[in-house]
Each structure stands twice: as structure tokens, then as C-alpha cells.
Image (cartoon, coloured by chain):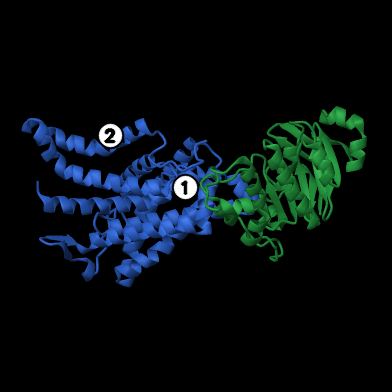
Chain colours: A green, B blue
Amino acid sequence: MLEVDAINSFYGQSQVLFNMSLTVKDGEVVTLMGRNGMGKTTTIRSIMGLTPARSGTIRFKNKEITSQPSYRIARLGIGLVPEGRLISPNLNVEENLIATANSGPNGSGRWNLETIWKMFPKLSERKSSMGNQISGGEQQMLAIARALMTNPDLLMLDEATEGLAPLIRQEIWSCLRDLKQEGQSILVIDKNLQALTEIADRHYVIEKGSVVWQGTSRMLLEDQTVKHQHLGV
Amino acid sequence: MNWLLLLEQILNGFQLGLLLFLLAAGLTLVFGIMDMVNLAHGSLYMMGAYFCATFTGWTGSFLIGALLTLPAVFLLGVVVEIIALRTLYARDHLDQVMATFGLILFFNEATRLIWGPIGLVIPLPEFLNQTVEIIPGAPYPAFRLAIILVGFLVAGLLYLIVSRTKLGMLIRAGASNRDMIGALGINIRLLFTLVFGLGAALAGLAGLMAGPILSVEIGMGESILILTLVVIVIGGIGSIKGAFIAAILIGLIDTVGRSFLPEILDLVLPSQTAATAAPAISSMMIYLLMALVLAIKPQGLFPPKGVGR
């Protein structure tokens, strides 16, 4: 579904990604792990076209998207849940969902307000609250729901549970688990090793802008070195 | 105090205020959403008046002329945005001021070339060119009344668009986070172009309605641009609601103040002093109001949420 092949990305003069490569297959849940400042968010921004890669290629559903504007990439079927959620404070919950909704790349997506309210009953109770009046957990659910409303083939979450209370985290994880069961492909950044190894199929560990380790959940749990050296567990 | 005169001046105040609102709505959206200072907004107002004068001349009907003017100014706005302004969004405000000031000069000279240095007249049809007595004993020009009605109608329509439609949601959301809207599949460039065209059409509407009562001449956009800037600063940059309230406020204060300040000052000052001070103070009043608002609420009366972070 997604193939990132040796991309190099920069912020101004300074290079952040060095020959970064990863793949996400159909229906797979893949994680990006690593300490802060290692290039996880930049990887996602490069895929999304927000910080375009200067070299290397990114293909999505076998189409090259490397230098496309981000709105085209989104319309091809990538839904972004950004770091910090970026909920519009001057729109209410329902408007946040409708404003950017679309029926997906092939026009037959199953996410609409009705299915979203069913999946996130808490949000339906807060329909008419403004985006800045809801709790952090609700904002994160709204950010996920907003991305789902574009009916994406690939969902990308940057810091899925950062700054949320343990109980709320559980809710987010169970929501992602449900999505996975329905066959949703997901690329997720988070620091919660245990939850990630339960949900995800494969993991990439990033250090200084390139992949230093990759493998399945079992391999990750058994590899003490990578956990110590690169994840600080 | 003369109550009939006061009522008439209040109506005049609304009329000026609604014209200002039509200009301010476009300017505040462009400023608030795209973070773009567009001094050439007054030029679009001027083009609205010239287009309408020309189309009215061709068709012999003010109404048809006006209806042709709106899409024409919309298109002009879109072309200006694509050719000139689009490249300026990422630049700083000083560059934008320089470039759009250049556009003012361009439009003024282009108008001189096409229409000549002498102003034009927009003849009104019979039914607008009379007076109506909505207040018994005080005949009021029908056209000015029409401006008030159209102004309120457009304000209402704009309110519905901004508060109820998907376009309106994107306009509000775009003001708080442009990148995110793009990453969710919205073509921000196209959205900006549309919003700019819409703002241009509103400015053109103000111009074509001001044309028959003021005069259609080169430079007519500059003086009203200053007032419009005062309006959006008082209202809170980016806020349609703020622009509406500030525009009506400015319209009323400017119009009613000019005609009644001498009488009010006369009550507290010696008449000699009042007579000399009144004209000076009345032309300053809106700027005094702006200074007061800025001192108390530096972001304006209704700063949109999420802007100015």
C-alpha cells in the first residue's frame, strides 16, 4: 500500500531524514518508534507532502506521490491524525467532522456521521461543543474520527496517545484494535511499547533519521538490545 | 434637537456602515485567513463602480449592469489573485503592502487609460431615483434605502454561508490551521482563490452601489479603504461578525457625529469654542474610537478564536 524508498528530507539547511525507508502493506498496522527528535514526525510529514522529501520516492497504491501537494495525497486515501490533534477551535465537534469529510478515493467509503457516532458515542454527546471546549481525550478521538471521515485507505497517527490519561489511552487503543479488525491499514507513532506490540504487526525503530531496526512484535519483545539502546526501555 | 434629522442621519449611518461592511467582509477574510494585507481592495471597489457604469451604459439598465458587474469583479479578483497575490502569501507583510500598493497605482493608471481622467455617472432607473416617506414627514432617497436593504440581505447571506455551509466551515477552520486543512484533502489554493473572488465581488457590489451617490472616479477606493481598515481593526481581523458590528458602529458614529457633535459640544463648551472644535473632532472620532478599542482590546472587539496564536 505505502512504500517509502530512501527519502531524504530537510528543514531548511538541516537534514532530518537520511535514506529513510519503510513499507505498509494492505491491512497492516505498522509503528514508528524511537526517541524524540529522531525523525518520526518528519517521516509522516514527508509522506503527507507537508515537508516534501528532496530525494527518494514515496509510492502509495503504486502511484508516486513524492512531490504532490498534500491535499492530493490526502484525496488518494491517506488520513492524518496529526501530533497535537490540531482540532479547529472555532468549529464545533460535528463541523470539525463535516468540514473536510469526503466519501473516499473510490467514493464508496463507509464512514459517515452515523457510523462515526456509533464508533465514538462520547463524541456524539458533544456534537455541538466547540473544538476547544472538549477534553484532550475527546479531541484525540475527534482527530481520529475526522481522519476517518475522509474514508482513507491508510490511517496515519502521529503520537496516538501522548498526554492522555491511562483510561483514555485504553479507549484509543481499543478503537485502533477495532479498526485493525475491520482491515484498516494504519501507520502509528507512539511511545507505549506494550500496547503497540499487542496491536501492531511490524515495527520500525528510527534513530537520527534512518531505520536502525525493523521486525515483528515478537522479535521486538525478545530483542533486549534494541529496547535499551534505541527506545530507552 | 431635531428628531427627524437624527432619524435621517441614523439611516445614512446604516447606509455608510453597510457599504463599509461589504468592503470589510472581503478584506477581513483575506487578512484573517490568508494573513495577507491587501491594500488593493479599494481598487476592486473602484472597478465595481466603473464596470457598472460601463455595463449600465451598454445595456441601458442599472439593474442588468449591476448583475453583470458582480461576476465580472469576481473574475477580476480571481485573475488578480492567481497572477499577483498568490505568490505573496508566504512573504512578509511589508512585501505585501508594497506589492498591493503597486496594484493600486496599476489600477488607477489602467482606469485612466481605459475610461479617461474624467469621472463617470451611473444613471439610476426611475423607481430608485425618487424619495419614499418611510418616516412620515421625512422623505428619504429610495436608492439609499435600497443600499440598506441589499446590505442587510448580503450580510445575512454571508452569515448563512459562513455559519452553515461546508465552505463556511473551511473558511473558519482555514483561519486557525491552513496546513491541517490541506492535509485533510482540501485544496487550500483553490479555497483562497474562491474566497478572494468572493471578497472582490463584495467590494464590487459596494462600489457599484456607492457609484450613483458618490461619484465614479479614479482614486475613489483609497479614501474608503482607510475607513475599511479602521473597521476590520476595530472588529477583530478575520471576524465577519466583528466586521459587521464595527462597520455599523463606524457608519453611525461618523454620520451622526458629524451632524450632531456641534450641538452636543455647544452644551458643554462656550459656543465659539464649540463651533471651531466640532468639525475637527468629528472627523477624528472614528480614529479616537479605534485608539480606544485598541487600548482595551488590542485584538479588536471580536477576535476569531484560534487566530493570533
At horizontal 32% and vertical 56% (from top left) the residue drawn is B116
Rendered position, B302 above or below B167: above
CA neighbours of label 2 inside 10 A, class few (<14), some (14 to 19), many (20+): few
Q: Which element carries disc 1, helix, strand or loop?
A: helix
Whether the residues at callouts 1 and 2 have beta carbons within 8 Å, the answer is no
Q: Marks 1 and 2, how far apart in space? A: 26 Å
The disc at residue A101 is: none
Say which quarter of the image contains residue A55. top right
At horizontal 15% and vertical 45% (from top left) the residue drawn is B259
Q: Which element carries disc 2, helix, strand or loop?
A: helix
Residue A200 in percent (x, y) is at 83, 46
Q: Nearer the viewer, mark 1 or mark 2?
A: 2
Q: In the displayed structure, does residue B4 sit left or right of residue A218?
A: left
Rendered position, B11 above or below A135: below
Residue B128 in percent (x, y) is at 23, 66
Q: Amino acid at mark 1?
A: Val
Residue B109 in view of the camera: no
Residue B258 in view of the camera: yes
Front-lying residue, B115 or A171: A171
Count the labels in the image: 2
Say which quarter of the image contains residue A210. top right
Front-lying residue, B182 or A113: A113
CA neighbours of label 1 inside 10 A, class few (<14), some (14 to 19), many (20+): many
Front-lying residue, B76 or B144: B144
Residue B229 in percent (x, y) is at 37, 42
Q: Which residue is mark 1?
A: B30
Say which quarter of the image contains residue B49. bottom left
In the rendered structure, which disc, 1 or 2, sits on the residue that comes first in sequence?
1
Q: Which residue is mark 2?
A: B288
Residue B159 in percent (x, y) is at 42, 56
At horizontal 67% and vertical 60% (from top left) the residue drawn is A111
Q: In the displayed structure, does residue A76 sit left or right of residue A232?
A: left
